Amino acid sequence: GNSVTQMEGPVTLSEEAFLTINCTYTATGYPSLFWYVQYPGEGLQLLLKATKADDKGSNKGFEATYRKETTSFHLEKGSVQVSDSAVYFCALSTISNFGNEKLTFGTGTRLTIIP
Amino acid sequence: SQTIHQWPATLVQPVGSPLSLECTVEGTSNPNLYWYRQAAGRGLQLLFYSVGIGQISSEVPQNLSASRPQDRQFILSSKKLLLSDSGFYLCAWSVNIPSSYNEQFFGPGTRLTVL
């Protein structure tokens, strides 16, 4: 079956540090890949996505590249801010028999940025 | 604009009692609807999804059931709650266009504690 393995947290970094959160996946076929984020007190929301090999998703200074050869979709940011403190979820999406997308999530990585 | 509502926000129930969680979406028609559970230390697990009124797909065998009595209403139920049903329940919707690339939009969630 499909699965997503994420870097275990929690992760604590100083402001302006470089961030990498590792994500690898197992799937049949060619899934789309997503990063969702859950800020404190808020609902889950899409951060970025990529639909095919070598695509790069980017948003709010975050980037992730769909690497088919290593089945990975690592999240990176060059200089983190305190406002980036949140829980980050990696997910893959496949199509069901009804044509809708089905998400398989990783366990989430809690990120805390210290001023 | 589209909004998604869930209630109640928190719920404490005794073992063996019934459950009914409700999710409604506004501002869109014929959405795909989803129920997820987030248990402590685990990622979001897809429980049910629906692509139309009266259609329900179950992803995992469990003590819960789902129904979609109206186009934008999704209900999660149980006749007798178990301790293992405790968790954070999230409802989500997406546009009803066949694709694995569609973004899902999440509600604020319901925290269920079974004692």
Image: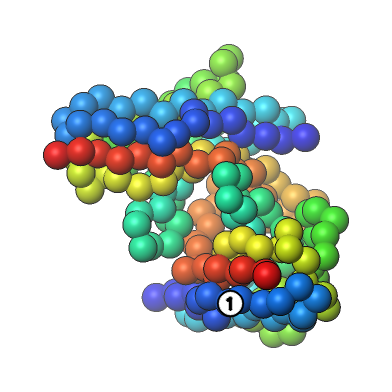
Give the vertical position of A25 relative to A115 (above or below).
above
Tell me: residue A39, above or below residue A64: below
Amino acid type of the residue that numbered disc 1 sits on in the rendered structure: Leu
Residue behind mark 1: B11
Q: Position of residue A66 (x, y in %)?
A: 49, 27
Q: Residue at x 78, y 54 (%)?
A: B59
Relative horizontal placement of residue A110, taking residue B54 as reference (left or right): left
Label 1: which secondary element = strand
Q: Where A23 sits versus A35, above or below?
A: above
Residue A81, position in %: x, y?
19, 40
Relative height, residue A67 to residue A84 (above, below): above
Foreground of the two, B37 or B49: B37
Residue A101: x, y in percent?
Answer: 65, 51
Residue at 55% of width from left, 80% of height from top? B8
- Which image quarter holds the C terminus of chain B? bottom right
Residue at x 78%, y 66% (from the top left corner)? B82
The front one of A113 and A22 is: A113
Task: Kindly identify which chain the residue marked by label 1 belongs to.
Answer: B
